[in-house]
Every structure is written in C-alpha cells, then in structure tokens.
Amino acid sequence: MKVKVIFLHRAAEIVPRDMRVIDVELREDATLADLIAFIGSNVSEKLALGVIERRLTVNLLVNDAPVTNLEYRLSNGDVVRFVTPASGG
C-alpha cells in the first residue's frame, strides 16, 4: 500500500528538505508504528526516536484526524502529517 507523508513545522526542519513530502510503500497491514520505523530507517532517525520516546511534541494526523495510537492501521491512500507546534515569534 502507498501512503503520503507530510512533515510540517519543526518536523519539517528535522527531515531533509527533499523529504518533507514523500510517498511511502508499506505492507498491507501496516500501522503508524511501522511507518515511524520506516521513517527512522530511511528519513530521520532523530525524528522517529523523538516520536517513539516522546521527546518531541508531535501530533500525528491521518487524513486530517488526530491519531494517538501507534497501532492504528493505515490504509492505501492515507495522508499522514507529522505536525509539531510552530514556534511563536
């Protein structure tokens, strides 16, 4: 299955510029945890560990709905956004 991943705000600063919007191929029964493992291996280990260890404040949105359970099953065509609070100024 294919999902689109979009990194926004601070999350976008952590990943390489050319990977801020990516399409990811995952197995059919993949969860958010599987996606985060893929990100750790292929995009940014720092971001993935920050999410897993809860050192980064990251909101995960699947098709614009907040999801907190990393065992949430993804579906083909889902759009997953990693949104960190924007710093004020």
Image (cartoon, helix red, strand yellow):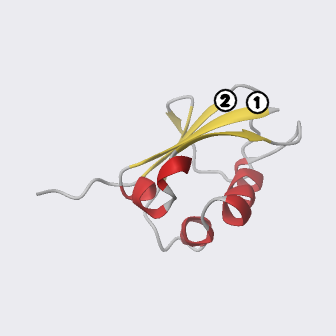
Quadrant location of the N terminus in the rendered image? top right
Which corner quadrant holds the C terminus? bottom left
- In this view, which residue lies farthest toward the top? 77
Classify residue 79 as left or right of residue 65.
Answer: right
Q: Residue at x 74, y 37 (%)?
A: 74
Residue to which mark 1 is pinned: 75
Query: Tag 1: residue type?
Result: Ser
Dot label at residue 48: none
Q: Nearer the viewer, residue 42 or 28?
A: 42
Q: Nearer the viewer, residue 62 or 42?
A: 42
Q: Position of residue 31 (x, y in %)?
A: 77, 47
Type of the residue with mark 2? Asp
Q: Secondary structure at mark 1?
A: loop
- Quick check: 10 left or right of 88? right
Q: Residue at x 72, y 51 (%)?
A: 35
64 relative to 22, above or below: above
For the residue carrying disc 1, how many other residues have a C-alpha within 10 Å: few (<14), some (14-19), or many (20+)? some
36 vs 45: above or below: above
Residue positioned 70% across, 60% down in the render: 42
Residue identifier under label 2: 78
Residue 39 in percent (x, y) is at 67, 57
Say which element carries label 2: loop
* Tag 1 near tag 2, CB within 8 Å: yes
Kindly give the residue lying farthest to the front in the view shown: 18
Q: CA distance from mark 1 to mark 2?
A: 6 Å
The residue depicted at 58 percent of the width and 50 percent of the height is 68
* Quadrant assignment, res 73: top right
